[in-house]
Image: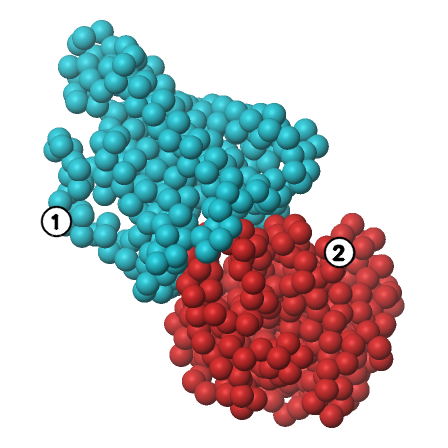
Amino acid sequence: MTEFVQYLVNGLTIGAFLSLIALGYSMIYGVVRLINFAHGDVFMIGAFAGFGTLTALGATGGMALPAIVAAVLVGALTTGAVGTGIAKAAYVPLLSSPRLALLISAIGVSLALEEGVKVLTHARFKSYPNALDGGRIFSGAVHVTWGQLALVVLSVVLMAALWLFVTRTMTGTAMRALAMDRDAARLQGINVERLILVTFFIGSLLAGAAGVMYGLYYVQISFGMGFLIGLRAFTAAVLGGIGNLPGTMVAGVAIGLVQSFSAGYVSSRWTDVIIFGLLIAVLALRPTGLFGERVVERA
Amino acid sequence: MTSPMNQPAPRDRGRRFRLLTATGAGLLLVPLAAACGSDGAGGSGPIKIGVPAPLSGDSASAGQDILAAAKVAAAEINRAGGVDGRQIEIVQADDQCSAQQGAQAAQKLLNSGVVAVAGGYCSGAAVPAIPIYGRRNVPFVMDASTNPSLTDTGKGKVFRTCGRDDNQGVVAAKFMTGELRAKRIALLHDNTTYAKGLADATADSLKQVGGQVVYEDALQPGQSDYSPVLTKIASTRPDVLYFTGYFAEAGLLMKQRRQLGLKFTLMGGDATTDSTVLKTAGPAADGYIATTAPLAKDLPAAGKFVSAYKSANGADPGPFSVYEYDAVKVVAKAIDDAGSTKGPDITEALHKIANFPGITGPITFDEKGDRTDPLYITVRVRDGAFTAYKKLDKSGATWVDAKTS
C-alpha cells in the first residue's frame, strides 16, 4: 500500500512536467494544425537558458529563491522568444503550403536545435546546482519532498493561468476562434499571423518554464533531453484530444502515472511499449482523444 | 550463460531517422569501400590508427576522454620519432554508442585507410564493428568494451587493454557477499549489451558464492526519473543494489535513492565512474561504490600521462583514458615489431607482445586477445571524488585496501 502511494507521488511529479509540455503541443496544433516536433527541443533550450542564468548568477548548492525565480523567468522568456522566432522563420511563411511542408520544416528545426546545442555544449551533460535536495515533507514509509510539492504547485498555477487567459481574455477568445476556423477568424478582423506568434510564445513559455523546473529537479541536462519526454508529452496531447486544453492537462498527469505504475507493477522496460501502445490505440479507436469534444482535422 | 550477442538492444536513444540515415549511408558506403581498397598499407605518409568512440549522445563525455587520451599517446609517440620513422595519425569516428552508428564508424575508419583500430566504449557499438574490421583483417584493440563475447567471437583479431565483465562479475559478487556481507542483492541494468552482460555475469557468480538475487530487471535509459524503479526495488528489500549500466543514469539513481530515503547500499559497474555522476548526485554520491579497473590517479605509472593529459585538455583524464593510452601505445609497438602496416602482421605482433610496460600494468594478451592478469578493484566516493577502496589479495579470498601495493 505504501508503495502504491509512493508510485502515485512519483507519477504526479512526472505528470506535472508532461502536462506543461503537452499543453504546448496542444495549443499549437489547435491554431496551426501543426505537430510542432521542435517543441521538445524548445523545452531543452529552456533548461539550458536556466542553467546559464544560474551559472551567471554564481548560484551553487542550496541557492536562494531569487536565483531560482530568475532562472525560471529567464528560461521561460528565452524559449518564448525562441519559439516565436521559429514560428516566424520556419512556420508562418509555409502556412498556405501543403501541410507536409510544415511538418518537414518542424522536423528540420528540431534537428537544428538539437545539433546546435550539441555542438555548443560539446555533447556533454551539464549539472544544475543541487538546490532541491533537502527538505522532506513526509519521510516515513512514503517520501515527499518540498521540491516535488513546489513543482506540482507551480505547474498547476501555470496551467490555471493559461486556462484563464484562453477563456477570459480577448486574445484568448481570438485564439479559440482561430482554432475553429482560420478564414472566418480573419473575416472577423483577427490578425491571424500575429495571433499564431502569440500562441507559439505562450506554448514555448510553458515548455521553457518546464525545462528549468526539470533541471532544478533532476539536475542533469543534455542536448537530447527533450526527445523522449517530448514524445511522451505528445502522446499525452493526443490522449487528451489534441487542441483540448483541459483534456491535455489531465492526460499529461495520466501518462505520468502510467509511467510510474508500469515501472512498479510491470517493468520499467515495458513503459514505452505501454505508453506508445496507448498512443496507437487512441489514434485507431478514438482519434479525438479520450476527452475530445470537437472533431479535429488530421494532417 | 546466455550469450549477450543475442541481446537485441544496443544503447539506442531512438534518434529520429538514425536507422534511415544509417541504412542510407551504408548503401552509399558500399561502392566507396570497394573503391578505396586497402590503401594505407605501405607507403610513407603517416600511419593511421582509428579511434571509434561515442563523441555524441549520452556517453559523449566518456568518448571525448578516450579520443583525447589517444591523441596524447600519438603526440608522445610522434615526439619520439614516430614508428619506423613515420608519424602516427589518429582518425576519429563517432559510434554514438549504438549498433547502427558503430557499423558506420567502422566502415568510415576502414575507408580512411586505418591500419589498426584502438578505441571504443560501448560493447553494443563494438558488436557489429568487429566483423567489419575482421573481414579486412584490421586488428581492433578495445580500451573499454568489456562484454565477454567480444573477444570470444573475435577470431583472435580483437584485443583489449580493459578487463572482461565475467571477471568483473566475479569481483562484484565476491565483494557484495564477502566484504559487504549482503544476503539479498538486486541487479539493475539497462538492456544494453554491456549492462545486460555484466548483470548476467554477476548473477551467475552470485549463485556460486551464495548470494540471493531478489531483483534483476532493466530501467529505460534517457527518462531521468527512476524513482518508480527504485521504489519497486526497495519493495524487494535488498541489502545492495548493483547497477551495471552507464554513468548517465548512475548519478540520477544516487540522487533519487536519497530523495526516496532508501537505505540499501548502491553499487555500480565500471561505466559509472565518470565525473558527471559526482556533479549530478552532489552529496548523494557519498559512499557510492563501483567495481572498476584501477583509475588513472591510483596507477603509479600513470603520473606522466595524467600531467600530459591535463596540460593538453585542461581537465583530469576520464576512467578509460589510461586504457586507451595503453591501447594506442601497444598498437604502435606491434606495428614497430612487425615492421609492417599489414593487418595480419600487426595482429601476429600483438599476440607476441609479452609484458609490455603499460601504464595500467604489464600487458600480455592470451590467445583470445584478453589480458592475462585480472584487473578489477572497487572504488568508493569520498569527499566528492572516487578513491581506491578494496581489492582481492593474491589468494582471491580476502579483501584488502586497494591503496597498499
Q: The cyan chain is which one?
A: A
Q: Mark 2 points at which residue?
A: B383
Q: What is the x, y in percent for residue B12?
A: 44, 61
User: Residue B99 versus residue B221: which sits nearer the camera?
Assistant: B221
Q: Mark 1 points at which residue?
A: A285
Q: Do the residues labelled 2 and 1 touch (CB within 8 Å)?
A: no
Q: What is the x, y in percent for residue B156?
A: 59, 88
Q: Is mark 1 on a helix, strand or loop?
A: helix
Q: What element carries label 2?
A: loop
Q: Looking at the picture, which amino acid does disc 2 mark?
A: Asp
Residue at x 34%, y 32% (from the top left corner): A24
User: Residue A92 versus residue B62: which sits nearer the camera?
Assistant: B62
Q: Looking at the picture, which amino acid does disc 1 mark?
A: Leu
Where residue A17 sits, quadrant-wise, is: top left
Residue at x 80%, y 65% (from the top left corner): B297
Q: In this view, does A236 lie above or below B330?
A: above
Q: In this view, does B312 lie to the left or right of B240?
A: right
User: Residue A93 versus residue B37: which sits nearer the camera?
Assistant: A93
Chain under numbered label 1: A
Q: The red chain is which one?
A: B
Residue A269 seen from this side? yes
